Every structure is written in structure tokens, then in C-alpha cells.
Image (cartoon, rainbow, N blue to C red):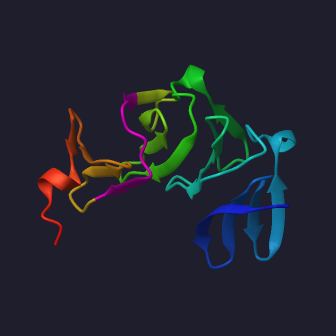
Amino acid sequence: MTIPRDFAYIGPEEHWFTTNRYAAHVVSGDTTRFSVSSGLAGEICDRVIAAADGSIWISHNEQGVLSRRFRNGIWRTYTGSDGLAGAALTKLYETNDGSLLVGSKKGLMMLVPGLEKIADTTGDLAPWFIGEDEQGYTWSLDDQYVYLHSTNYTSRFSPDEHFDGE
């Protein structure tokens, strides 16, 4: 049975979705499926995002690898040799500067535009949410803490210690 996993809206006539068996690109009602034989790193596709540069990022949760489809249709796979932590990938998020944040069960990783390797890793958290505020600060949440990430440091806040619960 095919189970839907995630969805990326490109425009009124175009979107991507992932399933436990393939990724699909839909344009004006026509669907193209992608699998390992067409360039994906794994059959089980989890998260998908459409980046500002026109590329598509797909995480393969259990394998701990990423697939990237460039505008020209070529796929590239990112693995542990590129700096991925090699654990289940939980979240993908593109920042305003075009960096890709990858959450996994072994930490938060960052792929900076122009570098084809993971440039930064923050271990000790397994984020299930990643977002950016209007000032460009990146925030993440795991099962215990709220994190604020900046260029030089990561701050960790405990909801029980820092918030009054209102």
C-alpha cells in the first residue's frame, strides 16, 4: 500500500509529493514518478521541499540520505561522506540565505549554498521543527528544548525553566 508522506507546493499547476514507495512531480495533471532507477537515493521518500533556486530536496528517512534534483533534471545524493550524520532524517528547512537545514536523530546539519558538503553540525538534538524568525534567527524544537541557532553559537531553553506557561 502506498502511503503519502509530504507535499511541496510549487504553483497552481505544479507540486511534488513523497510516499513510502516513490516521489512524484505533478505538472498540469501529468504525474512523473521517481524511484531509485530514476536517480533517487532510496525508495522510501519522506520529506520534500522546493528550494528557492528551483531544486527539489527529498529526504530518505531510514537511510539517512538526501536526494537533490537540480533544475536540469540531474539528481545528486548526499550521504555520510558529505557530512550527514547517518541517522533518520526528521526535517528539512531552507533558510532565507538558501542554506538547507537537515534535522536528524543525531543533530541539526547545515548545507551552505555553493559548498557541496555539510558545513555545520549541531549534535545533541533531534529536531522535529525548524523555522526562522523575521530577524533571520533559526529556531528548532526537539522533545525537550527550544533552540536558538546563530552563526557562532546555539542556545538551549527549557520550557519549564524559561517560560511561565501562560
Horizontal and vertical percent position of residue 160: 19, 54
* Corner quadrant of residue 123: top left
Residue at left offset 49%, top offset 56%:
52
Residue at left offset 49%, top offset 37%:
105
Looking at the picture, tell me which residue is in the foreground, 20 or 161. Answer: 161
Q: Is residue 111 visible?
A: no
- Asked if residue 58 lies in the magenta stretch, the reply is no
Looking at the picture, tell me which residue is in the foreground, 123 or 112. Answer: 123
Image position of 68 (left or right of 53): right
Residue at left offset 82%, top offset 67%:
31
Residue at left offset 53%, top offset 47%:
90
Image position of 102 (left or right of 135): right
Q: Relative to 38, is 115 above or below?
A: above
Looking at the picture, tell me which residue is in the foreground, 27 or 16. Answer: 16
Which region shows up in magenta?
A: 120-132
Image position of 41 (left or right of 154): right
| Residue at the top extreme, as displayed | 81
Quadrant holding the N terminus: bottom right
Q: Relative to 123, is 125 above or below?
A: below
Quadrant holding the C terminus: bottom left
Looking at the picture, tell me which residue is in the foreground, 134 or 3. Answer: 3
